[in-house]
Image (tube, rainbow, N blue to C red):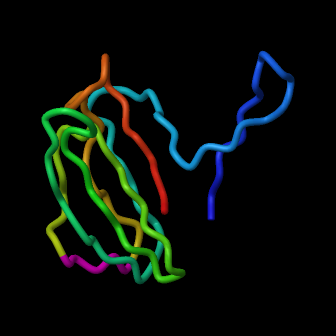
Amino acid sequence: MIFIFLQNLATGGTLLKEWYDFTMGYISPLLMGQKFSRVEKINFQRVGLGLYISVQHPYGFTMLCGYLKGVNVYKEKKIKQVYILGFVGATGETTGPCFRYNHT
């Protein structure tokens, strides 16, 4: 699993996050390189993540990518090599082009 550790400026300790927002150029391709993964869901939330993709990995965790402008996959698509899942956007509750990475 991937976890993001951030320094807590108030206490000097670290914070553990299971999600992170990455700022990127508008319409940048979002690549996926994990073999044997499967697109579980493609959905849109007006409030929240906007257009997002949920991908099931073979090791038992799910990756979610949100705020996308467009997608290049369909539900149940199996990823067998490096593949463009979608494109960075500004849908949902965001102030600029970025994507949210989340895993469970």
Q: Residue at x 48, y 63 (%)?
A: 104
Q: Is residue 37 found left or right of 14 in the rendered image?
A: left
Identify which residue is drawn at 18% across, 57% down. 72
| Image position, residue 78 (x, y; %) | 28, 80
Quadrant in which the N terminus appears: bottom right
Please name the residue shown 16% across and 42% down the image: 45
- How many numbered marks, from 0 up? 0
Query: Is 86 located above or below residue 15 in the figure?
Result: below
List x then y, in percent, for residue 37.
39, 77
Assess whether residue 79 is covered by the magenta stretch.
yes
Q: Position of residue 4 (x, y in %)?
A: 65, 44
Residue 8, by quadrant, is top right
Q: Residue 12, located in which quarter of the rendered image?
A: top right
Give the main secondary structure of the magenta stretch: loop
Which residue, as the protein is rendered here, is positioned at the far front? Answer: 11
- Span highlighted in magenta in the image: 76-80
Tell me what residue is drawn at x 32 percent, y 77 percent. Answer: 38
- Nearer-the-camera pick, 62 or 23: 62
Which quadrant of the figure has residue 63?
bottom left
Decide which of 25, 77 is in the foreground and name it: 77
